[in-house]
Image: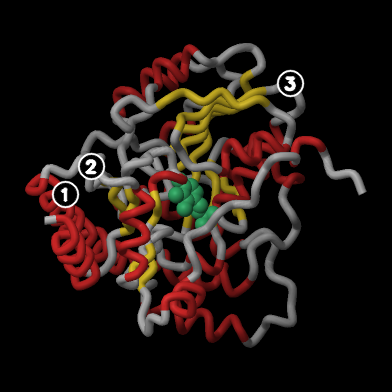
Amino acid sequence: MKIKSTLHGLTPYQPGKPMEEVKRELGLDEVVKLASNENPYGASDSVQAAIQEAVSSIAIYPDGGAAKLRQKVAELHNIDEQQIIFGNGSDEVILILCRALLSAGDSIVTATPTFPQYKHNAVIEGANVIEVPLVNGTHDLDAMYDAIDETTKIVFVCNPNNPSGTYVNEEAFMSFLKRVPKDVLVVSDEAYEEYVTAEDYPDTIPLIKNYDNLMVLRTFSKAYGIASLRVGYGVANASFIQGIEPGREPFNTNSIAQAAALAALDDQDFIADCKVKNKEELELFEAFCEDNGFPYYPSQTNFLLFSVNKPGGEVFDYLLRKGFIVRNGEALGFPSYVRVTLGTKEQNERIRSLLTDWLL
Ligand SMILES: *Cc1c(COP(=O)(O)O)cnc(C)c1O
């Protein structure tokens, strides 16, 4: 068999180490995974009941159009139902976009380091990837604008950025969006939007009515707490959505996931509570870094990228032996850093005291 040459040299996505594997290898009873930015408080209680109910009809294909969820998301954002495309995670919306817009010879512009799926999917479609270095951990939108040429089809703005946690403010985003040629799609990937507290974070969805070339991505995997069920969505103008829809599999979001997402959206108190707790934990962690002179990137997310001035791999190994799976910055483009998903208060305190015992 001959596999498309665009797949040569690509490696499958490297997820955080699985918990069961770590327990077995290290003989640990309890392992905490703070590696993939899931919600440490899980999901709203109402989600469990919604899943139980949906389980009774698993023999039936899901509603491919996700009508109920579509209506709820449209209400939430005050948009038309036709402006939404659902994916098996927002990862799949990225895949659909690349599939629909990119051919050999086309290009995309991204930041680096950033979320790896933009590049990965673009490479599979045979497109070139122009990577523009972050400046102080933040997207350099002027340089990204300069990198646009006649081959550019998509510019991905990960806001806030994974893995640095930093954000692009409204002024920077607007001045960029106004200049980008109208035939280049600007994707604002807002996987952590629910956690953002910065007042000058851009409110992008209302901009879509004036910008046909803007798509906003959201997910149920982070604050909404249902990462394993795989639901995310993109919002853009209706005729663009209609154009890319044939690139979506007919039943890409399953009925359990749709029901869970619907219930999760209904409980905005849960999201608000998680946001408050996350902010408190973030401030404690950032203060810990300040107090100890550990460099870090100010975060608008539920994770923190920081350095204890040792290779990320050493910190990763140390915390792993203590039962915490974090992300080694070496694999994320920040060799002397680790990226830690904020856990519960107890988990975060434990990590800080483990680091203190080890280093100080
Ligand atoms: C986690 C994450 C996603 C993927 O989310 P899914 O909806 O689970 O596919 C997309 N973008 C960024 C920046 C992320 O961190």
Mark 2, secondary structure of its residue: loop
Q: Do the residues labelled 1 and 2 touch (CB within 8 Å)?
A: yes
Percent across and percent down for residue 33 are 39, 68
| Residue 59 appears left or right of 273 | right
> Spatial distance from mark 1 to mark 3, Cα to Cα?
43 Å
Q: Of the numbered discs in the image, which one, if any, rests on residue 105?
A: 3
Q: Name above or below for residue 352 compared with residue 161.
A: below
Closer-to-camera residue (256/228):
228
Mark 3, secondary structure of its residue: loop
The crowding category of the residue bearing disc 1, from other C-alpha atoms within 10 Å (few below 14, some 14 to 19, many at least 20), is some
The answer, for residue 337, to whether it is visible in the render is: yes
Q: What residue appears at the point 76 percent right and 45 percent down from the top-left corner?
A: 246
| Residue 137 appears left or right of 23 | left
Q: Earlier in the sequence, mark 3 or mark 2?
A: 3
Type of residue at label 1? Glu
Q: Name above or below for residue 274 compared with residue 57.
A: above
- Report the number of discs: 3
Name the residue carrying label 1: 286
Q: Of the numbered discs in the image, which one, if any, rests on residue 296?
A: 2
